[in-house]
Amino acid sequence: MNKTDKNNNAKLAKASKVTNEDVGIKSRSIAFTLKSEERLPITEWLKEVQKFFGIRTAITNSLMSLYQNNEAENEILTKLDNVEMDIPQPIYFSYLDYQDNQIFDDMIEGLTVKFAVHLIANLSHYSENIRVQATNYIIELTSIFDSNLLSSNKKVLENCILNIQINDDVFKVISKLFQVIGPSLNRISLALVSGLECFYTYIDPLVRGICISALTQIINSNEKVFIKDDNMLSFWNLKFSLGAFAKVSNSYPDRICSIHAFNILSKLYTKDLKLTLNIIQELMKLEKKSRKEIQEIKSTLKKIFSDIYDTIKDDKSKYDSICSSVYESFKNIIVANNEDFLDLLSWSIEEFTKICNPNKKVKESPSLTNFVNSLSYQFNAVQPLVRYGAAVCLYSTLNVFPRLLPLNPDLLVIIVNGLVDNDCYCSSLYKHIFQTHTKLYPNITKLVEEYKVLESSKLNYDYDIEDDEKNYETDRLDNDNYIEKLLKAGISIAPNISKNQIIKYANILEFVSMKECMKFLSLIKYWGQKEKKVDIYVIQALISLLTNGKEEVQEKSLEVILALIPLFNNTNEKELLFIWSHLRNILKDHQDKEKMILTLINALMDFPLQRLPDESLIDLLKIQFTLIFHKNVSIRAAVYEFLNFSYDIWKSQDLKFNVISILYAAIGDFNRENAIKICDSIIKLSYNTVLQELVPNVKEIKDTLEKKLLEDLIKAYDNLANAIHINQNNCKNITNILFDDYFTDKFWDFFLENCSDDQLVKPDEYNYSKFFIQTPFFISLLYSKFSVPPPALNDVSNNTPRDVMPTSIIGKRRFILGYIICNFPLTGISDKFLRRMACLTLIRCCFRQIVLKHKILLRLMEFIKEKMLVSKFWTYKLSGLDIIRQLIIIKLPLISQCMMAQFLDYSLDCLQNSPIDQLKQGALLFIETSILIFPKAIGPRLQDIRDSIRLMFVDDNPRTTELASRVYNLIFSYCPESQMDDFYKYLITEIDLINKKGVEAMSDPLISNLSKEESERIVIYSISALGCIPNKLLSGPIIRELLKYITSDNYKIRSEALKSIFMQVERLSSAERLTILWIVLPLLADENFTVRKTFNIYLKNVQFSVELLQNIILPHKEDSPSLTSKTYESVLAEAETLVLSQKDISEIGNDIDKIYEKPIMRQLIAEQECEESLSIPPISMDYMPYIKAAAKKICGKVSNQKIGEIIYFLLSFLHTKPLKYASYLVLSEFCCYHDESISQISKVLSDLLYQEVCMENRKTMEAAIISLYNLSEYSPIAFKQIINTITSSNEKCDGEIFAIYNLMNLIKENLPSIAPELINSYLPLVINKRQPIQKRINALFVCAELSTVCSDTESATVMKAIITFINSFQSSREKMKIFSSFESILNYFKLNNEIRLLLIENARDNLMNYDEEIRDNSISIFKSFYKSLNESDLLWFTFHYLADPVDTISEKGKMILADEELYRKYNIYSVTYIDEKVKNSNKFFDIIKNEDDTNDDECPVIAPFANEDEYNYNYYNSDARKALTQKYGLPESLFIYKCRKLTKSPLDNFDKKTFSKSENENGTIKNKNIEELNNLNSISVLHHLMKQFPSISSNVINELFENIDKIINYSSTDTFNKNEISFCFSLLENLLCAIDGINNDLTNEYMKKLQVLINALLKKADDLRKHLFTKIEKSLYFFNDYIDVPIISSEQFNLIEEIKKESQEATLEILKTGKATKLNHFENTKNEFDSILENESEELRKSVTISMFALAIYGSYYTFSNDCNMNNLILGYRFLYNILKNEHRGVRNLVTNMLVSITKNHYKVKDEFMHETMVTIKNLIKILEKDDDVLYYRKIDILNLICNLSCIINDKSIEHDTIKILLNHWRDLNDETRIVSINLIKFMGECGVTEIINGLSTDKNDKSENSINIMVEIASLMSNPEYTEKAELNELLNWYFEKIKEIKITKTESKSKNLNQT
């Protein structure tokens, strides 16, 4: 330590100086005398120690102080301080100078103690030499006092010195040392302890801990000295030292030494009760206890408790008093300012009680009972921590003494009250106590089980605090609710508390915090319910809170009062009225406090209302009436519920009718559920009363509400109002109440508050929300029926009663309209439903049943005309038009016509000038209604209306244009006869203008600026209008005009034109009608779905919209060509009333839009009926029957004069895109009705066949073939003519072949004689190589089909053609395709010998082809000839198919044995199932493929393929589609037609088509065989057959070995194909797997063959590798000028120089002569070497690849074989082990995987193999230890193998060694080795090696003595900046943390599961 360190230490000592006196440690005067014989050795010892401390301590406080003065001493110290010391020096503690607590009379004794103390303190020195010397000096001193010490404790002392030297667990070592030498220090023990006590307040924790450990053992060894002589002072000082640590420093790891000291010394001090209790308290009060300290404290306290019990167990007199003292000391722990004191309180109480009551449960304990009872202050303390401490004491006491609660039931009151403690810790603890000790009560147990708490299993390491905050409020409410339930249940079982206690709770409510107040309110609520009578003072206290305090307190107070309602029955009348008056005030004055109001209303049902006076009850009902206008839906629902409930409790009949009246008043509640509830209540309460006659009308309202028919609701309201009016005598009881001024004024004020009497409200300012509370509809209707006057005008000077009509105009109108005015604001709302309901209500208010009140209607129309129609708000204008429109629909005599005439111009003005879409639409509806009701009267105005409507066609709103089209159609439907021709020309002209777009179009402002979409829209609407002109004379021209548009490219135009044609065609003559229908019939097969749908709707005789509308809405009876000149005002003024029919009244609310819905619905029904045809592609075989059916229904045979016209039109359609294909079909069908046109049409259709078959012409040719088939099927006589027409050309085209093939069935049935001729015409195509292959195949199929109806000669000719065709191909793939195409032919025809031999030869070649597609296709050919094979050939094929490595091929090959004959012959039914383990060996082949990424296969030819599922049949029938539709709830009925399998296209190739053949008689048997074979795998069947035919099996395998030899020996590197050798070895693998267990000797021979083959290949590869390396060494690459290569021989040097010289000479030649002769020679030499090198490299790759495949087979056999004997298995295992020495990494990797797999499968089954595996692991470990530096990359494979094998063996010692080896390689020089070793550690952890988890844990408790600390190694490497594999280490750590997380979650779930089960 240098000078700077010394100065720093001195400063530090002074800065942290805390004396013992500061912490209560007392000093003492000590004196002892050495014996005379001890003085000399002590003096010598002092000299040695003096030298030990040397100049650093500078003889200070030593013997030299006797001879030097102070000046000399200071001089020496100054000199010494200037000396720099490089060697470690012992520390002299000047700190002791501040702790002057020793006085010695003799200097030697004093120095001896002081040096001894310094030596003990220096045992903490950082230098091991200092520590060892100090230890030796201490032992030497001790031996002076006890000469036998060294001899008797030599070994122990040596161990102590060694441990002190290495500084291992120093406190424990020091304790052990002084335990040995302590007795020898008896005479100086007190002095030593006194000196060591000085270090209690030293700043260095290591020094403190050592001194405390030493003095503890010194005291323990010399107890008499310290008990008698020292009078227990050392124990008190030790006790005070516990409080010194926190004052001396912030960290005190040595405090555990003091705690342990009390453990050791407990026997000495427990006799002193005061000291013991102080020590107990001091230990429990320690702050910031560490986990180890807590464990040590528990151990110490347990020892103290045991020692206390030992002292009192035999003395019963002391037992209770001492136990009480200990419990009292526990109580003293409870303080209000430090919760660290309480962490051991629970444990201490339980532990002490258990120790004092051994071997039995505590049945009685007065001390414990007194202890709990003494906590009364603490239970009710203000400080939460004190209450918590008391709760802990109670909790612990009940845990060990559960009988305490039954013996002291008053404790349950404390527990129950504690449930609502405001401190969450207290309440949680009380909740736990309550749940634990009330399990005898089933209701409480059930409550606890039902409560869902936030389990720890819900938390994870990805815990999101934001999510927790979102759910916090809900969780808190759930917990509060649960606590309330627990409190209620607890109070129910607890004894009653005193009445004064509840009053005390009530008295302090206003003086405590809100939290405390809520707590006491809960207590009052539930404790009060236990009382028989509630004290009025409690109620007063609660009521005072209703108007004061926060809202939560008010709500809680009300809740408490309502909970005490059952007790009100015992209160007197005055008290009850007092309570009610305050509750009534809440209902009336605090309606903004919704929660309180709702709670109070719900509680009123339990209130003793019958005891209240009638005045109070009437007042209550009035208040309930006001609450029906409350905005809260729940409050209104509660009111209705209360009224329904309270009806039966009223004694007075008037009160009952009041209830019903309120319900009738509220029947217009906007909330549907509330309204239905009101209806139910009215129906229930009206039973057996005079109001029962109204029940049907109320039920009508209820049904309307339930069906959500809002517009019909007005009609239901009107019916109810009329019923009340009719039965007004019986309804007086309710009408008197409903018409009371209080009720009527409330409604008026609610709807029209702050509204002007003569003005409309402003929608932007008016509060429409009130209409979403109560609607005015029913009240308006009811009050209007009874002419209830409105409130009097708000004019102060006006004293006129309300039932007298005012004299002013405004007043009169207001009086007459009355409560109808309440609906006026709603006519301005934008919500169309409410606005429409308001309009309908206004109309119905004008009627009294069927009587119209002219006066009311006049005033209403006056308001509409003067206010609504001139308003600046569009909603009022629209409402005015809607009201007038509805009045016109009613067809009021003369009035409707007047209104139409007066407001028609207004509607046209709105239409032309309003920018509002809704207003324009309202005007259009008004015009539409006017035309329908008064078509004749409006005739003169139709031209103006038409022009206005025409402008709407270009509107941006689709709804507006749709309505305009509807009105436009009506205009042309009702145009007068005189104007029809002009209207027709108008449409034609407009359409022509738009289509031509000439100069005339530019002059029209509407047409000139049209977009394409707008132009098409006008054309569509004009075409639609053409169909509506009702004139027979014009029908023909109109249809001719419309025919132009059925070929339009726009499907909408085609659809509309077709619709218009159908509307006009019925006006034609029958001949004309048939002609037109034949012409438009192609539209039935239109390419567009909408057009086809339109045609199908016509076929279903469904009327179109305009026709239906005219049939439903009939004109007014008064309709005439001239409009009336009267006004509606004059008509209404002529009479008071008008009586209408009920039918006219029912028209109110009739909407034209609803009428339009009827044809739409009918069209939808028709569409569903036609779905079958609409879902079929129109150009297909399947659609043709629908065309035929339509032709039969609406068409038919026409006259000869019309045939040409129809054909002309149909042929003209062929040049149009939409109808091109459909016209062919219709032409063929037309010919079926008219034979004279067959020749012409068949020629047209036949010519289409001579087109090229391509995507462009495909549809045309399909249509032609379908049409030809239709023609041929219809007329067998004309069939020959059609065939001749088709085959007339000498050039045979594809279309002709397809057509003949599709007509094949008809040829066979009707014209078989033509077959030979057709065969002869098509066979030349087959043998013509110039023709496309597919065309030749198709022709051959046609010939084969035709030959089935010919003689054997033609069949033989066809077969010969087949052979010639096949032989013309050389490629195996092409041949296989041809064979596959002819599969159906070969299965159908009897094969001759020539073709059979050809098939067999090709099948053999194809079966050994590595291409799996070729092998797969060969199966179908094999099925055609396998029955003709002999047994050996049949089995050869069968073995190869079954052993094929492709599952699909082996499965297909297996099905050959389903043939009944073969199935029985080979006893397939007796096959024994074998696990197909060999399939697992694919992983070995995957390893090989990964080693060689080169692809030797040819690039696949990508060609377009035919759509096999053109109509999505497979998809619609698939499980995927069904799952999708089920997910979205779609019914299967939607897909019933889409799931049909449709006929394929006529142009599909014939490859997959099969000949018709009779059903196999053995079909059922074969199906059964197939089912049984499906349950067997191919290997099982192959094994069964090999067992029966061993010789054939041997031949097959030997043949395969020969084939492999050929590939190895005769194939060059150019012809070598990896896929071919892979297939051979895969085949061999399956064969060996199947033969396993049949002949072990033979199988062993095959394995030896493989060994020889592997050795030869690996040796060849090694030789090639060495040869290549030698060549590379001599090459230009190895000695490149730019590569720094070490030269190791003169030969290399000379070669380099020669190469350099040649290069230089070549360069100089170019520079001098410009020639490159030498350079070319140099380059040629290089290229020649490159070529040789490349060939030899390929040969090397070939050898390695084949060897790896052979190794894979070899390893696969031994991995999965269960029948090989142990000797062969071990030999095979060793053979593979020896290959680990190979230089090729891929070979080593493969062998490693195989060794692991073999070990996995066999180590548990066979013990001998287990031993072999253990030996292998040990050998590998030895190799690593011995040759680690020269193994290079082989280390990776060895490490991998060791790791995998150790995980399999699961031996702890081997796992330990493996982990050590892997950790050693974390620092390997090779980076790949480092990465692999890190990943293997992770792999072992994933395999469940526990030492990995323990090694990564930072918890020392999880580690054993020999465990490896992986985390330390990771930390070391992560801190190394040069270590490059930190990413892998991080990945390992991430895995570990995830694993720990999973373990914790699993444990938590397990605990939760156990708790749930418990």
Image (cartoon, helix red, strand yellow):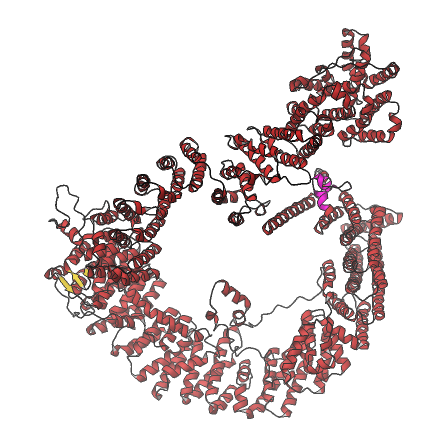
Against 953, is 277 above or below? above
In the displayed structure, 1011 sits above or below 450; it is: below
Q: At 70% from the left edge and 75% from the top edge, which residue is drawn?
A: 1454
- Left or right position of 1224 against 1645: left
Residue 1912 counted in the magenta span? yes
490 with respect to 1446 (left or right): left
- Which of the two residues, 1342 or 1789, is positioned nearer the viewer here? 1789
- Quarter of the rendering occupied by the N terminus: top right
Which residue in the rendered view is the most extreme toward the front? Answer: 317
The magenta-colored residue range is 1892-1913
- Is 1636 placed above or below 339 here? below
State the residue in front, 546 or 1268: 546
* Percent x, y of residue 720: 25, 60
Of 732 and 1761, nearer the camera is 732
Closer to us: 765 or 418 = 418
Residue 1911 location, quadrant: top right
Q: Position of residue 1731 (x, y in %)?
A: 78, 60
- Find out whether residue 1294 is within the magenta segment: no
Q: Residue visible at 57% across and 88% down?
A: 1318
- Toward which corner of the image does residue 1161 lie, by quadrant? bottom left
- For this view, does 421 lie left or right of residue 1335? left
Q: Is residue 596 left or right of residue 1569?
A: left
Q: Is residue 124 visible?
A: no
Residue 1090 position within the rendered picture, expressed as x and y whole percent measured from the top left: 40, 70
Q: Residue 88's spot in the image, x, y percent?
A: 79, 23
